[in-house]
């Protein structure tokens, strides 16, 4: 955790919070040199909606505010507003409402949720109509100044994904009336795996230009900075350490040089122990200082 003067792109990571948001999460963040943090506020692979620890919540919120550290929540992976299963749809609403409430309680700027898939062989349009029915009311509940933004994260394109390519975000935003509390979390591994090359000359710029054209300026609010173990278009969500995968240092440098990423924090979700996360953070900080063009 560093100074309150934010760089162009604050760099941090998803931090473990077993033992307390502040006690464990912020300690890990300091050790990797994080300037921004992301946390889970519930079991990411379950439906439980636990109450927070008020003391830990306040300590976390105060420390992030004092250090000028942007904080984010990642909602559980099971959430799918396009599911054909009524129970999954119902639980998705409760789970995301919980993440949004907990996000506000800890001072998070945004809550990241995966865009889901059209299960059960249903048509994309039917699934998007359900997304609207279930998700728009949750967005309309975000009326307070300190409510977090809801940040949509596309997937690597497995199965009947509703959003994998950047253009897929267009119909999703339309289904939600381009709500003012709606934003995008761009996962570099996901978008690369979905088919957007970030390595060829000008490729990163074209991807980001398309994103702005699709959802509008200012909607990109967070980047999950993950290299890819697999080649472009592989539709495999396998994260690699920065510079050690198929995106490579030049791909991240090009992303950081683009005007659309100005002021957007980078959250690492890369493999390895704490020391490797610290190395990844240091490399991203170096790349933001020496961009290599777009």
Image (cartoon, rainbow, N blue to C red):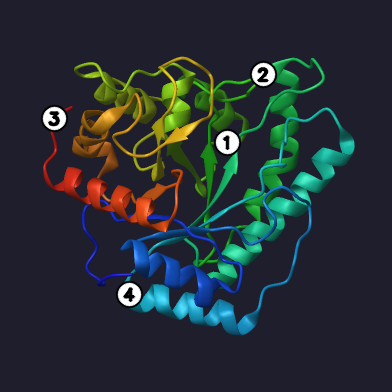
Residue identified by numbered label 4? 67
Q: Position of residue 197 (x, y in %)?
A: 34, 18
Who's the residue at 54% across and 61% down the image? 16
Disc on res. 177: 1
Residue identified by numbered label 3? 293
Mark 4 to mark 2 CA distance (whole Å): 41 Å
Q: Are marks 4 and 1 in contact (CB under 8 Å)?
A: no
Q: Sort mark 3 into few (<14), some (14-19) or many (20+) by Cα contacts within 10 Å.
A: some
Who's the residue at 64% across and 52% down the image? 140
Mark 1 to mark 2 CA distance (whole Å): 26 Å
Residue 35 showing in the rendered view: no
Q: Nearer the viewer, residue 250 or 214?
A: 250
Mark 4 to mark 1 CA distance (whole Å): 35 Å
Query: Closer to the N terminus: mark 4 or mark 2?
Result: 4
Q: Is residue 195 above or below residue 291?
A: above
Disc on res. 287: none
User: On the picture, is 193 further left or further right than 158?
Assistant: left
Residue identified by numbered label 2? 159
Query: Closer to the N terminus: mark 3 or mark 4?
Result: 4
Q: Position of residue 92 (x, y in %)?
A: 76, 45
Quadrant where the C terminus is found in the figure? top left
Q: Nearer the viewer, residue 182 or 245?
A: 245
Query: Closer to the N terminus: mark 4 or mark 1?
Result: 4
Q: Quadrant of residue 196?
A: top left
Q: Are marks 4 and 2 in contact (CB under 8 Å)?
A: no
User: On the picture, is 166 further left or further right than 2?
Assistant: right
Mark 2 to mark 3 CA distance (whole Å): 34 Å
Observer-side mark, 4 or 1, equals 4
Observer-side mark, 3 or 1, equals 3
Classify mark 3: helix, strand or loop: loop
Q: Is residue 70 above or below residue 285?
A: below
Q: Residue furthest bottom?
A: 55
């Amino acid at each position: 955790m560093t100074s309150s003067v934010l760089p162009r792109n604050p760099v941090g990571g998803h931090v473990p919070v077993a033992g307390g948001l502040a006690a464990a999460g912020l300690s890990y963040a300091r050790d990797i040199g994080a300037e921004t943090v992301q946390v889970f506020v519930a079991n990411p692979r379950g439906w439980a909606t636990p109450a927070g620890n008020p003391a830990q919540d306040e300590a976390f919120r105060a420390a992030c505010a004092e250090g000028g550290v942007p904080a984010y929540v990642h909602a559980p992976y099971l959430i799918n507003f396009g599911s054909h299963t009524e129970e999954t749809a119902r639980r998705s609403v409760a789970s995301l409402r919980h993440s949004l409430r907990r996000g506000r309680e800890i001072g998070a700027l945004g809550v990241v949720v995966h865009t889901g898939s059209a299960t059960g062989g249903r048509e994309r349009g039917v699934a998007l109509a359900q997304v609207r029915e279930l998700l728009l009311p949750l967005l309309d509940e975000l009326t307070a100044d300190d409510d977090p933004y809801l940040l949509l994260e596309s997937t690597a394109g497995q199965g009947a994904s509703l959003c994998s390519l950047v253009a897929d975000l267009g119909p999703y935003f339309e289904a939600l009336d381009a709500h003012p509390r709606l934003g995008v979390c761009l996962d570099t591994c996901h978008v690369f795996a979905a088919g957007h090359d970030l390595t060829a000359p000008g490729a990163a710029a074209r991807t980001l230009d398309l994103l702005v054209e699709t959802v509008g300026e200012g909607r990109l609010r967070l980047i999950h900075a993950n290299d890819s173990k697999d080649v472009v278009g592989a539709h495999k969500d396998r994260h690699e350490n920065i510079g050690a995968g198929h995106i490579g240092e030049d791909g991240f440098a090009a992303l950081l040089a683009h005007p659309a990423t100005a002021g957007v924090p980078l959250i690492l979700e890369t493999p390895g122990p704490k020391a490797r996360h610290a190395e990844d953070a240091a490399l991203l900080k170096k790349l933001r200082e020496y961009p290599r063009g777009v």
